[in-house]
Image (cartoon, rainbow, N blue to C red):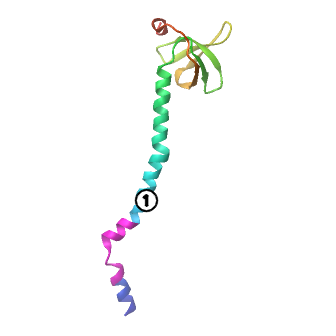
């Protein structure tokens, strides 16, 4: 007699019971979105805008820690940095981590 009553009680709340079981999972996804995914997308968007705004004369830091002055911005995604007097290296534009100082570069000569 006790088994049949317990079975009858468990079978009664189908949809409401499923909703209460999935609610914590949905809340976890919402929290992850607002705390992890959304800020990461915002940082990526800001980094992309910073990379596109790099011009000749800017002092930049690469993700490897190299600090140099932009000598030339090339079309193929490379940037030529002058790291010392007469020493120039090419780095991938996406590896620029920070623009330290804006220079007075020519926009016309950047793409040449």
Residue 18 found in image quarter = bottom left
The spot of residue 19 in percent (x, y) is 35, 65
Q: With respect to residue 39, does 70 lie above or below?
A: above
- What residue sits 67% from the left and 6% below the top? 86
| Residue at the bottom extreme, as displayed | 1
Q: Is residue 33 above or below residue 96?
A: below
Quadrant of residue 64 within the rendered picture? top right
Question: Where 61 falls versus 87 (above or below)?
Answer: below
Q: Residue drawn at (58%, 25%), measured in percent from left and top?
A: 98
Question: In terms of depth relative to the viewer, which is nearer, 81 or 27?
Answer: 27
Tell me if residue 67 is in the magenta stretch. no
Q: Which range is magenta?
A: 8-20
Q: Name the residue that disc number 1 marks.
A: 25
As helix, strand or loop, the secondary structure at mark 1 comes to helix
Image x and y of residue 72, in percent: 54, 10
Q: Is residue 34 left or right of residue 11?
A: right
User: Considering the image in quadrants, where does the N terminus appear?
Assistant: bottom left
Residue 76 at what x, y percent from top left? 47, 16
Q: Residues within 10 Å of mark 1 (few under 14, many from 20)?
A: few
Name, please, the residue furthest toward the right. 85
Q: Quadrant of residue 80?
A: top right
The image position of residue 91, as x and y in percent, is 58, 19
Main SS category, magenta section: helix
Tally the numbered discs: 1
Q: Relative to 83, is 30 on the left or the right?
A: left
Q: In the rendered view, would you say 23 is above or below 112?
A: below
Q: Is 18 within the magenta? A: yes
Q: At 36% across and 83% down in the image, what residue appears?
A: 7
């Amino acid at each position: 007699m006790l088994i049949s009553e317990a079975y009858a009680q468990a079978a009664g709340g189908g949809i409401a019971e499923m909703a209460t079981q999935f609610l914590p999972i949905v809340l976890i996804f919402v929290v992850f979105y607002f705390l992890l995914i959304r800020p990461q997308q915002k940082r990526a968007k800001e980094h992309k805008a910073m990379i596109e705004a790099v011009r000749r004369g800017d002092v930049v830091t690469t993700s490897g820690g190299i600090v140099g002055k932009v000598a030339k911005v090339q079309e193929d995604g490379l940037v030529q940095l002058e790291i010392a007097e007469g020493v120039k290296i090419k780095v991938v534009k996406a590896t620029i981590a920070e623009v330290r100082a804006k220079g007075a570069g020519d926009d016309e000569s950047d793409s040449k």
